[in-house]
Image (cartoon, rainbow, N blue to C red):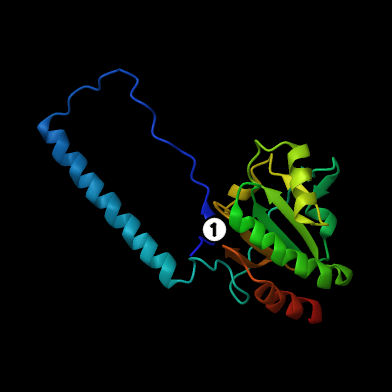
Amino acid sequence: MEDEYIAMSTRRKPRNSGVREPPVKPGKRQLIAMVSVAVTMAVVFAAVYVYSSGGGHEGYVAGDSEPVAPGFSLVDSEGSAVSLAQYNGNVVVLDFMATWCQPCKDQIDNLKTIYASYAARGVKIVSIDVDTTDTASHLQEYKLERGASWPFVRDTAGVYIESEYSATSIPTVVIIDQSGHIVKRNVGVMSSAEIRSFLDPLLEG
């Protein structure tokens, strides 16, 4: 089964530089071991807490304390400025993606279905390319290949790492209501039916 999302972990351990590290004294080895165990236990407890509190794969859901979506101003693949502020009063769907991400292509196909049905009702979609090594021309080519009609922007401001978005895995879909609050954050491919289930109540409310 194909993965539904890709973790954006790009850090690698540095290669051996040839510089020898000083030997660790036996007493320090025991201290390091104790610290390592403590850190491991803290990580495990934190993971259990996140899972049990519903803060795992699904992220925010309607009814939780809904955070305000951080503003941004970026340039799209056609050279036009795109900001979250210009969509005040509209429902906004943010699609954090990358051109090399296969699940992201599936997400765009789902968003095309949403765009066809909801663009006329004022729903705005913005795809945010988290890989800034992509050029604007390459992103525009990708947009045309996928047959998308909404803005594709390069995340030159690091929007994806904002804690409210936390799009460290892609695709991540974030749905923002008319008042600028995040009502849904989904990691992995989000079906058009599930997106509709959040859009309809916002538009009918």
**Up/down of 131 relative to 95, above or below:** above
Residue shown at the point (85%, 67%) measured from the top left: 119
Q: Which residue is mark 1?
A: 5
Q: Residue furthest top?
A: 19
Provide residue 43's location: percent of width, then percent of height. Answer: 34, 55
Quarter of the image with the C terminus in it:
bottom right
Provide residue 143's location: percent of width, then percent of height. Answer: 77, 50
Residue shown at the point (24%, 45%) measured from the top left: 35
Would residue 75 be seen by someone viewing this image from the given angle?
A: no
Dot 1, crowdedness within 10 Å: few (<14), some or many (≥20)? some
- Name the one closer to the observer, 145 or 33: 145
- Name the one closer to the observer, 27 or 191: 191
Would residue 105 be seen by someone viewing this image from the given angle?
A: yes
**Up/down of 189 relative to 100, above or below:** below
Q: Residue furthest right?
A: 120
Residue 169 picture quarter:
bottom right
Q: Is residue 101 left or right of residue 18?
A: right
**Up/down of 39 relative to 118, above or below:** above
Helix, strand or loop under label 1: loop
Say how many tags the image has: 1
Q: Is residue 3 left or right of residue 180?
A: left
Residue 189 picture quarter:
bottom right
Provide residue 88's location: percent of width, then percent of height. Answer: 82, 61
Provide residue 157's location: percent of width, then percent of height. Answer: 68, 41
- Residue type at mark 1? Tyr
Q: Residue furthest left?
A: 26
Residue shown at the point (76%, 63%) measured from the top left: 92
